Amino acid sequence: MRTGTRGAAALAVLATVLAAGCQRPAPRPAPSTPPAPSAGPSGPRAPADIVDLAAVDPSVRTDIRYATAHNFVGRPITGYPEPLCLLTRRAAEALHRVQAAALAQGRSLKVYDCYRPQRAVDEFVAWAKLPGEQQMKGEFYPDEPKSRLFADGYIGAPTAHSRGSTLDLTLVPVPTPDQPAYAPGQPLVACTAPAGRRFPDNSVDMGTGFDCFDPRAHTADARVTGAARDNRELLKRLMTAQGFANYPREWWHYRYVDEPYPDTFFDFPVARASLR
């Protein structure tokens, strides 16, 4: 965790909020000799086994939302200077095997977020405490009061994403249709609206949009039926077969179970300069 006001706020949240919304419980004590990253000219650098997913499997599509304004905060997030999917090599190679299986069924993977720096987590925690910043409510939490985001587990810290083996993803058709660019300030549509009405993500229908703070985003929510349920179950089967575990409150969230850094939360930026 970073020091300072926002880091202190994040630690205070742990006393009352269980890990959810891409979160997990407080980490176990760190190993006596953690694999601390070295410092580069522009900040900390990643361990040698953190890679750009595109170097392992360039066929996996990317839509790194936190490097853009199209996310629940409404602006690019600190720590995302480049729209990259960084993962431990172990997780990236497992995802390559998932992609091969998906392509065999006429689908491709598309990732929304992979490694997430601790500084980004701190920004989410700080944002959640600002009641006036709700410009993206109409899409990402239309039925959830912002004041409840902590208590209901949608925002919290720490996150497994900061350990480098967790990612958020979906399935897209092959061939994959173009996706219209998001224009800041455009009219928002609830992430719980039918697929034909909400933001025109080129994903197959998953029942809700990505980062939807709503119970209907729970992987097994009974209100999600038909093709959307089938698509969720297909993604889960493909990911589970290669060693990933789903977080039941988010259909898009998967963690590689055999992760190499289960107790270490990194803070290097999502950038090529962070890699060795």
Image (spheres, grey):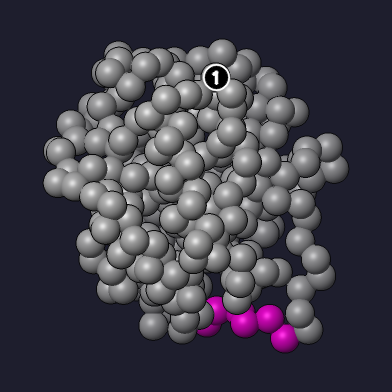
Determine which residue is flagged by label 1.
Answer: 223
Residue 267 appears anywhere in the view: no
SS type, badge 1: loop
Query: Residue 146 magenta-drawn?
Result: no
Q: Position of residue 87 (x, y in %)?
A: 45, 67
Of the pair 274 and 249, the residue shown nearer to us: 249
Of the pair 241 and 48, the residue shown nearer to us: 241
Q: Position of residue 219 (x, y in %)?
A: 56, 36
Q: Position of residue 225 (x, y in %)?
A: 47, 24
> What amino acid is labelled 1 in the image?
Arg
Q: Is residue 152 above or below residue 160?
A: above
Quarter of the rendering containing residue 214:
top right
| Image: magenta residue range | 33-39
Task: Pick the quarter of the image with the C terminus.
Answer: bottom left
Residue drawn at 18 percent across, 31 percent down: 180
Query: Residue 34 magenta-drawn?
Result: yes
Mark 1 Cα-neighbour bin, 10 Å: few <14, some 14–19, many ≥20: few
Q: Is residue 115 above or below residue 199?
A: below
Quarter of the rendering containing residue 150:
top right
Residue drawn at 65 percent across, 47 percent down: 23
Residue drawn at 50 percent across, 62 percent down: 241
| Magenta segment, prevailing SS (helix, strand or loop) | loop
Q: Total label count?
A: 1
Task: Pick the quarter of the image with the N terminus.
Answer: bottom right
Q: Is residue 87 left or right of residue 130?
A: left
Q: Position of residue 37 (x, y in %)?
A: 55, 79
Residue 96 appears anywhere in the view: yes
Q: Is residue 208 left or right of residue 201?
A: right
